[in-house]
Each structure stands twice: as structure tokens, then as C-alpha cells.
Amino acid sequence: MAVSFSALDKRIERDTRVLHDFLWQGAKERGSALASALLKDARDADAFLRLGGLLRKSAEPLAKGLEKPGNGESLFELLDHAWGLGSATVLASKKDYRRAAGRAKEVVGSASIGVCANAGCFEFVEEWEGGKVEFDPYAGKLAAFLEPKGVLDAPQFKRMLTTVYNFGMNWNGAASQFEQALAARASIAGGGWCLLTAVSIREMLGAAPRFSSSDYAKIIDRIVARL
């Protein structure tokens, strides 16, 4: 029986949170049980978003090797970001434009953290999450850090990150439905660009996630095409 969006959304949010806490908060969790839950999430998300098996196939080796260094982090990025962007398209189709933009905001914020963690500037994340700086200057510091390393897209990455983030953070609910619809779509499309660029930057830095970037690009392209 097909799973509903609401049920799947809650389940993936719960399981990726458990994975997050397992990886970065020292939480105790049975690896095999968590891996099985995440693999089921990936399969159901793939079917729901009609991704043609791409998400499922990308997630399988990571979930089955969850205890290996780097696999859990890559699985979190793959599933959390793909579903986050995909769920935004579902919300946009339901004309829940504010929440759609909010999902895109969450996704790009998370992607920026992954870049910082792998570029060697996680202190920027700590400043932002600790409330010492707002998102815009945080993204600016990241771009300034990346550009001397040869990341030519760093300024554009910063601009798109802040655009998507600010759409979600400062939503104009008084705008017309047409404007809100376009803002949500722009957030989702821009969010997709940020996700792919984040992976490209990490590849350039020699810290690529452990899934195929070409398959990931196809996943994101199919998700954005749902608009």
C-alpha cells in the first residue's frame, strides 16, 4: 500500500534525526536497525518522488555499510537533502508556499554546513549556529574562505545560498499567490543548484561524499522538474 506524504515525511524526519544524533551527538543506536529504517525510507522516498530507483540505488551501499567511516554522513546528506527538496515540491503543489520555501531554506543551510565541515572551516558554522553572526555574513565568510582555494563559483554560491535562505526566513505572506508561488519555485530551483554546487565544491577540495555525483545530479534534476 502506498504511503502518504505526511506519514513518510514524519518518518524520514525522525530517522534522519536519529542518524544525525548517532553520527554527531554520540547517541547510541543499533546500527542494523537504523540502517534498515533508512533504507526503507530511501526506497519509499524514491517511489513517492518517482526517481526511477536512483535514490534507492545510491542509498543501499551506504546504509548496508553504515558503520564504515564516511558512509553515514553521506547517507544523511543524500537522504535528508533529496527528501527535503522533494518535500518542498510536494508542499508547493499543495499551495503551501511558505513551508515549501522553508524546506528549501533548511536544505541549503545543511548543505553549507557540509561544505564547511569538509573545507576545514567548521568554526564558521559554530559562530552562525551560536547566534554570533547572521546567515548572510556566515555565507560570505565561507565564500571568502573558498575562493583562494580555487573555487571560482564561491561568490555565486554565497549569493544563491543567501537568496534561498532569506526567502524561507523572511517570507512575504502579504504578496499575491502568484508571487508566492514563484518565490517557492525559485527557492526550490535555487536550492537544487546549491545542493549540486556544494557537492562540486567538495569534489574540488578532495572531500566528495560517498555517492555518485552524476546520479545525485539526476536525482536533483528530477525533483526540480516536479515543479
Image: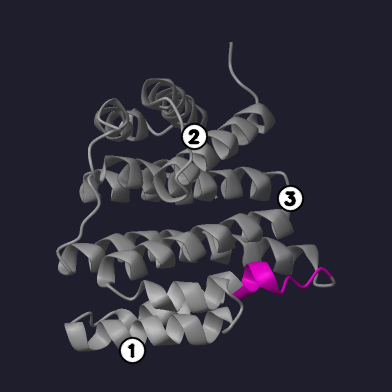
**Quadrant where the N terminus is found in the figure:** top right
Q: Residue at x 37, y 21 (%)?
A: 32
Q: CA distance from mark 1 to mark 3?
A: 37 Å
Q: Secondary structure at mark 2?
A: helix
169 within the magenta span: yes
Nearest to the observer: residue 43 or residue 110: 110
User: Residue 95 has which mark?
Assistant: 3
Q: Which comes before the other along the chain, label 3 or label 2? A: 2
For residue 201, above or below residue 30: below
**Residue to which mark 2 is pinned:** 49
Nearest to the observer: residue 7 or residue 95: 7
Nearest to the observer: residue 140 or residue 101: 140
Q: Is residue 218 visible?
A: no
Nearest to the observer: residue 75 or residue 226: 75
Spot occupied by residue 160 in the image (x, y as percentages of width and height): 46, 75
Amino acid carrying mark 3 in the image: Lys
Q: Which comes before the other along the chain, label 2 or label 1? A: 2
Q: Which quadrant of the structure image shows residue 8?
A: top right
Q: Which comes before the other along the chain, label 1 or label 3? A: 3
Q: Which quadrant of the structure image shows residue 208?
A: bottom left
For residue 153, above or below residue 204: below
Q: Which residues are magenta?
A: 166-173
**Residue to which mark 1 is pinned:** 144
Q: Residue at x 52, y 29 (%)?
A: 48
Q: Which mark's residue is nearer the viewer, 2 or 1? A: 1
Amino acid carrying mark 2 in the image: Leu
Amino acid carrying mark 1 in the image: Ala
Question: Marks 1 and 3: CB-CB under 8 Å?
Answer: no
